[in-house]
Amino acid sequence: MKIFKLDNKGKYNWNMVIILTLIPLIGVFGTAIYVYYNGVVWQEPLMLFVFWFLSGMGITMGYHRLFAHKAYKTNVFVEWLLMIFGSMALENTILKWCSDHRVHHTKAETKEDPYSITEGFWHAHIGWIVKNVPEEHSRVRGVKDLTNKSAIKFQNKYYFPIGIIVGFLIPLAIGFIYGRPIGAFLWAGFLRLAIVHHATFFINSMCHYIGRRTYDFKSTARDSWFVSWFTFGEGYHNYHHKFQWDYRNGVKWFAYDPSKWIIKGLSFFGITYDLKKVNEHVIVQNRVNNIKTQLSEMFNKSGDGIRNYYKNKVEKLHVKSENLFVLWSEMEQKYAEQLSKGKLKNKEIVRNLISERKRYKEQLNSIKHDLQMIMSNVQKKRMHPNLA
Ligand SMILES: [Zn+2]
Ligand SMILES: [Zn+2]
């Protein structure tokens, strides 16, 4: 007798549907009912936060930036820690997660992208996990570089027990200590897991849906400071898709990206090293070029009048910016050579370098501003005398 078709051959993987429905239901309503009858003690929100932080960092700092993108290096001990914390998030093994994620980057917006936004918000958010996918799409690939790591080998054998023990049984045990095991189990286990899951899912859905496309307007990935607030800095997704191996997602110093701050902070103690980061002049060049490409697409659609009106101005700005890119890049090279030669006078060299960078940045920012003004005028089909 078949009540439920749990053979997982249909459109949906019903085991996953049930699990991913129960976790938030128990997490939200179970915790709410528990609070209604038993109130809240300070240990529970604190444990929610600590376990959320650890499992979240396991995913962002570990699964994502360390293992999938190799944006920095660290020692085996930290690899193990991040593996254990990441397992608590119950988002599959590092190998499977990285395999899916690397394909998401290389095949973004195609049928091969496991969580392609082109198949809709729902599919990108959670649909891709609860649906059955063809064997060739679910296979682990492109992660040979990771298979020899001891933490990963261990996780391949014991992923599920680690996730359950650290993510559920340890909170339960702590709950026994302060006399409310069920409270701890609900807050730090189920509610925490529901938050971690959907926060990660929002990067695949919301960050391919709402937000700015400052670095690549042709990509569906978008920068969302809002999503960053609950994903430990992973919301700056347009930048991330453009420069995926950068250890930062929020590239501006003030951008909320705790993963970036922790990776950088640990580097001062030598715990993390070889942090990869895109040079500032490349980022600025990319931003200006992104506007130029957008503008030329707009000109293709606009009437001749608008195009002719702004053509010369845009051409002049283009030439000016190209020259500045070349000069800036040469300047960087010159300083890099000087710095590599010796430590004497290095402080002075660095000071000069910073002020030169500032000068180039200001000039390019003014070009960027003019291009943006033109873009806004073209959008409004307006001919602005000051810019022509
Ligand atoms: Zn993405
Ligand atoms: Zn990524």
Image (tube, rainbow, N blue to C red):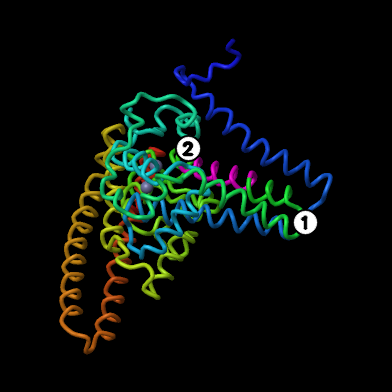
Percent x, y of residue 358? 32, 71
Q: Amino acid at mark 2?
A: Ser
Percent x, y of residue 52? 58, 53
Whether residue 44 appears in magenta in the rendering, the answer is: no
Residue ID at (73%, 55%):
176
Q: Nearer the viewer, mark 1 or mark 2?
A: 1
Q: Which residue is mark 2?
A: 205
Q: How many marks?
A: 2
Q: Real-space Cα distance between discs 1 and 2?
A: 39 Å
Residue 249, compared with residue 4, is above or below; it is below
User: Disc 1 or 2, which lies upstream in sequence?
Assistant: 1
**Is residue 373 in view?**
no
Q: Amino acid at mark 1?
A: Gly
Residue 188 located left or right of residue 218? right
**Circle 2: is it few (<14), some (14-19), or many (20+) Cα within 10 Å?**
many
Q: For mark 1, give the secondary structure.
A: loop
Residue 346 numbered tag: none
Q: For mark 2, give the secondary structure.
A: loop
Main secondary-structure element of the magenta-colored stretch: helix
Percent x, y of residue 209? 46, 37
**Is residue 143 in view?**
yes
Percent x, y of residue 92? 45, 41
Q: Which residue is mark 1?
A: 179
Dividing the picture into quadrants, the one containing residue 269 is: bottom left
**Do the CB atoms of the residues marked 1 and 2 lie less than 8 Å apart?**
no
Q: In terms of depth relative to the viewer, which is nearer, 385 or 380?
A: 380
Whether residue 196 appears in magenta in the rendering, the answer is: yes
Residue ID at (42%, 58%):
80
Q: In terms of depth relative to the viewer, which is nearer, 331 or 2?
A: 2
Stretch of the chain drawn in magenta? 190-203
Which quadrant is the N terminus positioned in?
top right
Dividing the picture into quadrants, the one containing residue 143 is: top left
